[in-house]
Every structure is written in structure tokens, then in C-alpha cells.
Image: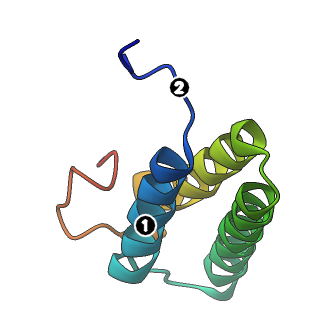
Amino acid sequence: MSDNGSIVSKEKVQKYLDLTTEARLKATPITNNIEDEKRLEDMLKMCDDYQKDALYFMNNGDLVRAFGAINYAHAWIDAAVRIGLLDGHGDDRLFTLP
């Protein structure tokens, strides 16, 4: 039986954990005011919380929830880049650029 991409494996979850960590490290704040800083802080906290959840689920054998959580984590970073609170530095592999 070949893996056509529909199997959630520990390796696949780890790949996306690594990708999200790379994105989290690369993106830099470009906020102009305290309100935007607060919104960005909330978005990054959501990213970090979902990433921790993904690790927890993966380490407890719940790979489907782990895969879902890491995708949510990455979406928070991606959204912050997309709306202009983070600079994705032109990296269209890690981010959906505006």
C-alpha cells in the first residue's frame, strides 16, 4: 500500500512542526502602534499554544489532532503576515504573502 499523502504519520506531523518553527523564527513584527502590537501578541500566543498542543497530541499518539493543531498554529503566523503585522521577508514557501 503506497502513501498517497492521506496518511497522518508522526514524520508528517514533525515535518509541519519544523515548518511552523521555521516560520515563527523568520517572521518579524512590523507593527506601528500599541493596538497592533497587542493583536500580534495575541496571534503569536495562539500560534505557540497550538504548537504546544500539537506536540502534546503527537507525543500521546493522537496524530490526527496533532496534525490539525499544527496547521492551526501555522495559520496564525500566516494570517499575521497576510494582514501586515509580521514581515514574511518575501518567503512564499512559508507564508501566503499579501
Q: Is residue 82 above or below residue 26?
A: above
Point 29% across, 49% down: residue: 97
Q: Quadrant of residue 73?
A: bottom right
Q: Please say which color scheme the image uses.
A: rainbow
Measured as percent of width and height from the top left, residue 28 is found at 39, 82
**Quadrant assignment for the N terminus:** top left
Q: Is residue 29 visible?
A: no
Q: Are marks 2 and 1 in contact (CB under 8 Å)?
A: no
Instruction: Tell me the mark number nearer the camera, choosing from 2 and 1.
Output: 2
Residue 89 position in % (x across, y down): 21, 70
Is 57 located above or below residue 86 in the figure?
above
Q: Residue at x 68, y 73 (%)?
A: 48
- Disc 2 element: loop
Q: Secondary structure at mark 1?
A: helix
What residue does disc 1 label? 18
Query: Mark 2 is on which residue type?
Result: Ile
Total marks shown come to 2
Residue, disc 2: 7
User: Which mark is on residue 78?
Assistant: none
Q: Earlier in the sequence, mark 2 or mark 1?
A: 2
Q: Position of residue 82 (x, y in %)?
A: 42, 51
Q: Nearer the viewer, residue 39 or 33?
A: 39
Q: Residue at (36%, 16%) from the top-left corner?
A: 4
Residue type at mark 1?
Asp
In the rendered image, the vertical position of residue 84 relative to residue 70, given as above or below: below
Q: Quadrant of residue 53?
A: bottom right
